[in-house]
Each structure stands twice: as C-alpha cells, then as structure tokens.
Image: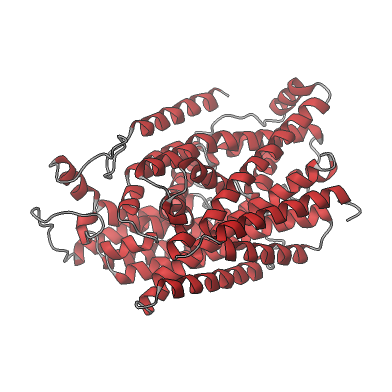
Amino acid sequence: MAEFGLINWIVLIVYFFGMLYIGVIYGKGNKTTEDYFLGSRQIPWWAIGLSVMATQCSAVSFIGIPGWGYASGLDRITYTFQFPIVVAILMVTFIPFFYNTKVVSVYEYLEKRFGAKSRLLLAAIFLLSRGFQTAVVLFAPALALAIITGTDPNTAILMMGVFTLIYTYVGGMNAVIWTDVIQMFIIWLGIALSILVPIFTVDGGFSHIIENGISNNLFNGLDYSLGISNSYTFWGGILGSGFLYLTYLGTDQSQVQRVLSAKSIRETKLSLSLAGFIVPIQTFLFLFAGICLFSAYNGKSFENSDYVMLTFITQTLPVGIAGLVTAGVFAAGMSSVASALNSLATVTVNDFYKKIYPEASDTKCLKVSKYMTLFWGVFSTLFALCLGGLGTVLDIINILGPLFYPCMLSTYVLAVFCKKGNEKGCIAAVLSGLAIDLYMFLFTSVGSLWWCFIGFVFAFAVGYIVSIITNKDPEVDPAKEFSFETAVGSELTINNVVRLAMEKKIAEKDSSGYYVVPGKMDKIGYVLIAFFVVQCVILTVI
C-alpha cells in the first residue's frame, strides 16, 4: 500500500464498490431468465455498441496493444482494421437470423436448422473455448493489479475472481452492459493520457515522437506481402483476423448475446455499426500510445511488452489518476469476465439444463443460471492461476481463439448459406476443423490468426461434401406460410428468405427502414465499406 499510495487505493476501492453497487441495483430487476441473460431486450443501441467495444478492448487490449505499438509500431494495425467489413457482413447474414428467431442462445438456431446434436456439440465447444479464454481475460487485469500495487500475482487473481463472481452473480446482462459503458470511458482516459503525457514531457514533443518513430520503423504502412507465417500482413488481417472476428462477433454467444438484447433490428445494427467505426480508430490510438511511450522511455527494453503500459501507470501518472486508471483496467477485466460468465451460464442452462429438464420452471432456471455462473467463475479462476510465463496475454488469447473458431464459423456458413447443409455435414465440419487447427498448432509455423481462414476453408469443404452425399432434407414447400420463429431446416437459409421477400410473402423492412430479412444491406453497411476503403488508402500512403 505504501508504494501504490493511500489516495490511489481509496480511488480504486471506491470504484470497485461503485461497480458492485451498479450490479446490485440491476440485479434487483432480474426476475426471469430473459431479464438475467438479455436485459429484457430493452437496452439502447449505443450502450450495446459501447459494450461490444469494451469487451473487444478489455484489459487484454489496454495492456497488450500499446505493448505491440512500443515493440513494432503500426505493424499490427491489421488486427482490427477489417472491423467495418466484418460488421457489414454480419448485418446481412447471421445477425438477422438470430434476432428474428428470438433465440436466447445462438445454438438454438442450429437445432432449428439441423437438429439437437449439432446444437449440443457447438454449445460444448463454446463452453470449452470461452471458459479457457475467460481465464486469460481474468489473468490480464490481475497481472496489472499485482504489478501496480505490489500484490502477489496469485493473490491478485483470486481477488479478481472472487470480486467478479459476486458482481456477475447479482448483476445479469443489464449490469454487464452499463458497467461496460463506464469502463469504456475510463479506458479512453488512460489511452489519452498515455499519448498526451509523452507529447508534453518528451523533449521536442510531438514532432520528436514522430521523427523517432519513423527512424525506428514504427510507422510502416500496410504490408501486402504474401505468405502465411505472418498473421499481421494486409492479407492476414483480411483473411486471418477477418475470419476470427466473423466468428467472434457473429457466432460466439458472449458477443451475440449483447446484440440479442436490443429493442429492434434497427438498434441491433446501429450497435454493431458503432463498433465497426470506432474499433479500428481505437486500435490505432492504442498502437500510437505505444509509439509515444517508446520515445518517453527512449526505447528501453522490457522483459514482456505487457509491462510497457503498466510501467507508465505506476511511474508516470499522478496520484489519484493512477488509481482511477488502475480501476479502469480492473473494471475492464471485470466487465469482460462478467459478460463471459453470463454467456457461459446462458449456454449451460439453455442448451443443456433445459434439454435435460424441459419442464423446469423459469424460476428454477434462473437459480441454476446463477449456480452455473459460480461454476464457470471458479473454473476460469483456477485456470488463470496456471497462465504465468506462457507469453503476453494477447499472444495467449490469439492462440486459444483461432484454435476453436474455424469449426464454429464453418458450421454457421453451412447452415445459413447452403440449402443442402445437414447435421452430418455440420458434425463433419466441426471435427475436421478442430483436427486441422490442432495440426497447424502442433506441427507447422503457420501464423495463429491464419488458422481461422485455413481451418474454415478445410472444415467447410468437408462439411459441404458430407452434406451433399448424405442430404435428405425435404424441399421447402413454397405454399407454406413462413415465420422466423417456427421455420425449420432449409427454410432458415438466406436463399429461401430472400426468395420469400422478393415474392412479398414477408416484409423486407421494419417501420424505421432497416432490413429485417437477411441478404439485404442497409445504407449504413455501404458507409462502413467506404470507411474501410478510406482507411486502407491512408495506411497504404503511410
């Protein structure tokens, strides 16, 4: 406490209890599982959009991306520069299906489309992969807390885990999103300070930072070179990170669950669009913060690039502000872990417990949901205790995600786009996707973000071929009345829905002018694409 300072500790503790208070307030309104998991579908779009960004730029990004900027400048800008394209694609494909079918878990759609086996298989894979990734997201702010305050790392992990469990247990989705909104602004404050403080304290100021960055090759533009050993080229960003984020934002329950909590399809799309515009700019500022700190520390070597931002907080920020930014790091991790635990509980209850006990009351399911939150919190905390020494937090999470994601994306592409796709093809895609990614991880030097694209292509090809060979799905009856909530099988494919919209058997747009049906792009989608093109031109010129 002496090193961190009494005032910083007071700020930190007040912030902790403020977040817990918000959780308790919103927890009082959780009377049903829909309240607990989806916030009664009454959360405004801008809050959902900020929540999506908060999770994407959690404590992992706050610590890791400035470290990337410090070590290699703008080389890794391709990590999120494809966000506008990804969001535009999702608003035309997966998201309308999930929203219109009114599912709570995205894996419910798979049962409607294929059958119960595919739903349970993909839900199990999500639980495994997200459980491990949540441990990494828990580890990052605990590491920060340990370094900044002098606490033992394992003690910090346990503190973080216990506090997050209490907060998540009582809060539900409403608390997760609104605390995300608050911590987003705290994170922006931290990044702004990491840029402005060096500009006003380094000899020569902004011009020196730019000159120093150029002389040390920190302002390299987009790398268009071919090859799959480097994940951070232009092509690695489009095909590697692009397919990773298609899976993460479009098929991962922890992200889609936020979108499903919106009031309307219009607000769903606006929330995603907000993230599509801001996330690439945000990543640039994170990297630029690292470049500024490179000049502030005269290119000093760090044992681990994660320590760059942590050193800035402990050695440079004034008393009180250091406590607030530290609280922001902790809160970022807390809210990210909370949302993950909430989604893990959602899938456990909706895709497993309710299948085993279909007659269980909603009150009973709500109680089980909280127990499952506790279970996954303990699981993640224990795994987080084993992460020390495995590398930077972003490196770890960029291995865990791509290892599991291709089989998930191939399954949903097979479901949404392929009329002849079936459950046997789905299972074949999952197993082949896991096998090829495990092979690349163990026996090749292929960059981890490339696993998403290569694994997806291989898994989808296998799934489609198996579906063609074994297809027994009956043809869609053109005379049958269509409803998103009751449709099953190949009725829930894009080509069928678009056909019905063209025949005017279902409405294309809602009252606000946004497309309800999949396969149709709103004006904001074209703006996102234009934004991506402008971004690429600027980065190429650099």
Image location of residue 185, percent across then percent down: 64, 40
Q: Quadrant of the N terminus?
A: bottom right
Colour pattern of the rendering = secondary structure
Residue 317, can we see it? Answer: yes
Q: Residue at x 34, y 50 (%)?
A: 94
Q: How many marks?
A: 0
Please state which of residues 206 and 402 is positioned toward the viewer in this rendering.
206
Indicate whether 366 appears above or below 499.
below
Q: Nearer the viewer, residue 519 or 321?
A: 321
Q: Where does the image place residue 103, in percent across and percent down from the top left?
A: 35, 59
Q: From the image, which quarter does the C terminus lie in? A: top right
Q: Residue at x 13, y 54 (%)?
A: 481
Q: Nearer the viewer, residue 316 or 486?
A: 486
Q: Is residue 235 visible?
A: no
Q: From the viewer's perspective, is 58 left or right of 451?
A: right
Q: Residue at x 36, y 56 (%)?
A: 410
